[in-house]
């Protein structure tokens, strides 16, 4: 009798190991964090490894500044080399052609604030490197590039052949590729009928299903402290993306220069610490949630305070949060009820 | 059998319990209550999990004074643990963002050194979130 009771007591306390698989790896020069719930460990590992292999391939296809193996450039690198040499049209994969068509549409919607054609400006500021250090800004180079106006609409894309009418275009999909990778991973998992997963690529996160009985919960990084400023639930098919001035930046004479360049001035945007956008699932014919979570934070980051709402609305985004350079927090009306602040005494303003 | 008996004739069974049985039941309940209290409500971290590259390198208790020397992608880094806190104290990376993060003490806090591919995460019993949108 007593042994049985003892046995059941232990059974109750030592119980359930959650069916949660978790892995983290470095791809795209950032941290990739994959959680899969409700699959056996073996199957979850198999799924995660396939996702990581897909990401590795995308990275090789889209790397904007480094040869990917030996002296061989990425597919995007080859295209950039041809554009800059003013050569004839280059044949690219249908996947890349579609990405660039989509990125062009998004660039137009953002009034050019999301502009993947300004790769030369980004490298002038020293951000096309694995590690950043302070650069002395070459003002003439910035001015010349600004004057040359490289834009996505300079690209002519026809039946997978691409050329540019402007040789100063240098494509850098840094603000697109991670979101695209999320969409690829989500559609792969759906195809494999894995129902519950959370994928985080360097601050862009997409959710499938739930974490057991509860929704997945995501923490939003505090831009100036090593902690989450708030958490929120991420429902099935939703994506969230944060752009900040704290992961890729350098300091020069007390001034912070981050990797998000304002295409209108050629200088790093300086009135914002971070922008978070929360994106609902999109119709299958449209740009998917992952890409939007990556792209839409940029124009909001760059825009002046008065125009942030309009920048979000241009993409139909209703849920977003901005922390400006003075650390003032602005939350869109819809987003307010979704946030759980880590510090209950936090002060923020609700945007109309 | 006994379980079935317990379901059908609880009274008889309870009468049969000896002093020792009661002690075990009461002590177990107290134990569960104590663990629940101390582990679920405490947000101060108990352990630090260190990852190097794609692997979890190790998990250490924060209740110690210790320096951990690690070899990352770029070179040697040092992580310090002291009285419930942990931090990067040396890193071979250019930017030193990881070192500038300073001491971490609350569950859920993370410091990541992307260039050297080393990360710290403080673990408590309750996780505030599944993943951090950094």
Image: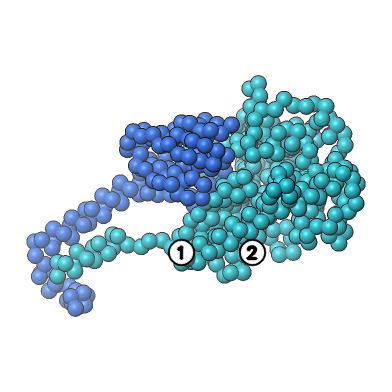
Chain colours: A cyan, B blue
Who's the residue at 68% across and 45% down the image?
A297
Q: Which residue occupies 36% across, 34% down?
A: B66
Toward the top, the furthest residue is A253
* Quadrant the C terminus of chain A occupies: top right
How many numbered marks does the figure carry?
2
Instruction: Estimate the spatial distance between the alpha carbons at disc 2 and disc 1, rounded to whole Å.
Output: 21 Å
Q: Is residue A142 left or right of residue B37?
A: right
Q: Residue A42 or A250: which is nearer the viewer?
A: A42
Asked if disc 2 and disc 1 are in contact, CB closer than 8 Å, the reply is no
Mark with earlier residue (2, 1)? 1
Badge 1 marks a residue whose secondary structure is helix
Given the image, what chain letter belongs to the residue carrying mark 2?
A
Give the structural element (helix, strand or loop) at label 2. Answer: helix
What mark, if any, has residue A203 been given in the picture?
A: none
Residue A92 image position (x, y, % from top left): 80, 57
Q: Quadrant of the N terminus of chain A?
A: bottom left
Relative to residue A211, is residue A348 drawn left or right?
A: right
Q: Which residue is mark 2?
A: A187
Residue A61 rendering spot, x and y as whole percentages: 71, 53
Percent position of residue A205, x then y: 59, 52
Q: Choose top left, top right, bottom left or bottom right for residue A259.
A: top right
The residue labelled by disc 1 is: A41
User: Looking at the image, which residue is at 42% across and 45% down?
Assistant: B49
Dividing the picture into quadrants, the one containing residue B103 is top left
User: Visible in this render: residue A166?
Assistant: yes
């Amino acid at each position: 009798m007593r042994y049985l009771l003892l046995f059941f007591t232990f059974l109750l306390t030592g119980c359930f190991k959650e069916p949660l698989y978790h892995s983290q790896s470095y791809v795209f020069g950032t941290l990739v964090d994959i959680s899969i719930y409700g699959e056996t460990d073996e199957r979850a590992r198999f799924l995660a490894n396939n996702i990581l292999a897909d990401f590795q391939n995308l990275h090789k296809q889209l790397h904007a500044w480094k040869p990917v193996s030996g002296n061989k450039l990425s597919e995007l690198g080859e295209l950039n080399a041809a554009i800059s040499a003013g050569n004839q049209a280059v044949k690219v994969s249908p996947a890349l052609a579609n990405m660039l068509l989509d990125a062009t549409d998004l660039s137009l919607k953002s009034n050019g604030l999301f502009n993947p054609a300004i790769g030369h400006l980004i490298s002038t500021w020293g951000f096309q490197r694995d590690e950043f250090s302070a650069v002395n800004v070459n003002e003439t180079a910035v001015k010349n590039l600004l004057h040359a106006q490289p834009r996505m609409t300079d690209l002519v894309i026809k039946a997978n052949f691409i050329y540019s009418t402007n040789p100063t275009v240098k494509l850098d999909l840094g603000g697109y590729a991670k979101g695209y990778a999320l969409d690829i991973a989500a559609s792969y998992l759906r195809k494999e009928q894995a129902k519950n997963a959370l994928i985080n690529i360097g601050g862009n996160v997409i959710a499938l299903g739930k974490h057991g009985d509860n929704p997945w919960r995501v923490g939003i990084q505090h831009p100036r402290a090593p902690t989450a400023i708030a958490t929120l639930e991420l429902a099935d098919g939703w994506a969230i993306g944060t752009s900040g001035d704290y992961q890729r930046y350098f300091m020069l004479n007390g001034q912070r220069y981050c990797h998000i360049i304002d295409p209108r001035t050629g200088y790093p945007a300086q009135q914002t610490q971070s922008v978070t956008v929360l994106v609902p699932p999109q119709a299958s014919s449209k740009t998917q949630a992952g890409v939007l979570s990556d792209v839409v934070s940029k124009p909001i980051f760059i825009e002046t305070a008065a125009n942030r709402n309009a920048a979000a609305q241009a993409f139909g985004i209703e849920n977003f949060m901005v922390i400006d350079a003075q650390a003032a927090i602005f939350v869109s009306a819809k987003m307010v009820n979704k946030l759980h602040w880590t510090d209950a005494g936090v002060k923020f303003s609700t945007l109309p | 059998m006994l379980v079935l008996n317990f379901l059908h004739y609880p009274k008889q069974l309870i009468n049969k319990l000896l002093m020792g049985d009661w002690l075990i039941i009461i002590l177990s309940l107290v134990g569960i209550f104590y663990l629940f209290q101390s582990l679920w409500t405490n947000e101060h971290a108990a352990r630090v999990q260190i990852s190097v590259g794609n692997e979890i390198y190790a998990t250490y208790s924060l209740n110690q004074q210790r320096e951990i020397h690690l070899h990352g992608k770029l070179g040697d880094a040092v992580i310090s643990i002291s009285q419930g806190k942990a931090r990067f104290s040396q890193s071979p990376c250019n930017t030193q963002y990881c070192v500038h993060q300073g001491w971490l003490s609350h569950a859920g806090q993370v410091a990541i050194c992307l260039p050297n591919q080393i990360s710290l995460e403080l673990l408590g019993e309750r996780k505030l979130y599944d993943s951090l949108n950094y």
